[in-house]
Image (cartoon, rainbow, N blue to C red):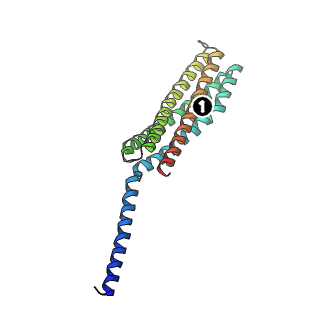
Amino acid sequence: MSSFSRKALIFVIFIAVIAAGYAFAAFWQGQNRIPNSFTTARNQGAIIAEAIVATSNSSTAELAKIDQYDKEGNYSQALSLTRGLVAQASGLRGQAVDLSNQIQTMTQSLSGVKDLAAQQDALEAISSELALINQLVNYSGDLGKLLDTLQARFSGQSGTNAEVTSEVTQINTDINAINNYNNQATHALKAFDAAENP
């Protein structure tokens, strides 16, 4: 075999080794690649959850005013603020539906996540976001109860300030729980990222 042929053969083998290495790397990355559908749903879900948290948090100051107006006997102002919060909560229902759709997509895409630890972290995030939606339902229901109580007090039918204060406290508990579930989901997704990118 001539010197030129040996050099050509070595060059061909060298190129083949590089190509094989590249193909293996591409295959390995493909095996560990997070499905695009999961990533998109995760990002959209995070945006929606943050919006829900921001909206529910904004009602905290209004709730304190409602309790104060009720103590002062200013039921019309208390009712007006409560109706505003109930309307706001109705708007949150649409966001809750959107969030549940993103969670469904994340769940369906989970089989494409190969790392078991990352799968577990994703499941924890999904569980926390579902709990957030459930707590949002409670929040909306408790606002409805507060509105009913204030309407009864305004008409002189029944109800006490202690009941109003108790219901305001419960709504604030709902808000804290919504925050906590969102924080848990965020923490789980950070752990997911760490598992996928060790």
Q: Indicate the secondary structure of the residue bearing disc 1.
A: helix
Q: Position of residue 161 (x, y in %)?
A: 66, 16
Q: Is residue 144 above or below residue 152?
A: below
Q: Nearer the viewer, residue 134 or 77?
A: 134
- The residue sitting at the right extreme is 72
Q: Residues within 10 Å of mark 1 (few under 14, many from 20)?
A: some
Q: Nearer the viewer, residue 81 or 34?
A: 34
Callout 1 amino acid: Asn
Looking at the image, residue 84 sits to the left or right of residue 102; the answer is right
User: Is 177 or 138 nearer to us in this picture?
Assistant: 177
Q: Is residue 32 above or below residue 162?
A: below
Q: Residue beneath label 1, please?
A: 176
Residue pictured at 57% horizontal, 28% vertical:
174
Q: How far from the left and from the top, in percent, is residue 89?
A: 53, 33
Residue 92 placement (x, y as % from top left): 51, 36
Give the position of the N terminus as an image quadrant.
bottom left
In this view of the protein, which residue sits in the foreground, 130 or 54? Answer: 130
Find residue 52 and report its image quarter.
Answer: top right
Query: Quarter-wise, where is residue 51 in the image?
Result: top right
In the image, is 117 to the left or to the right of 61?
A: left
Disc tally is: 1
The residue furthest left is 1
> Looking at the picture, how far across and down is residue 6, in whole percent?
32, 82
Q: Is residue 109 left or right of residue 137?
A: left
Residue at the location (61% across, 35% down)? 57
Q: Residue furthest front?
A: 1
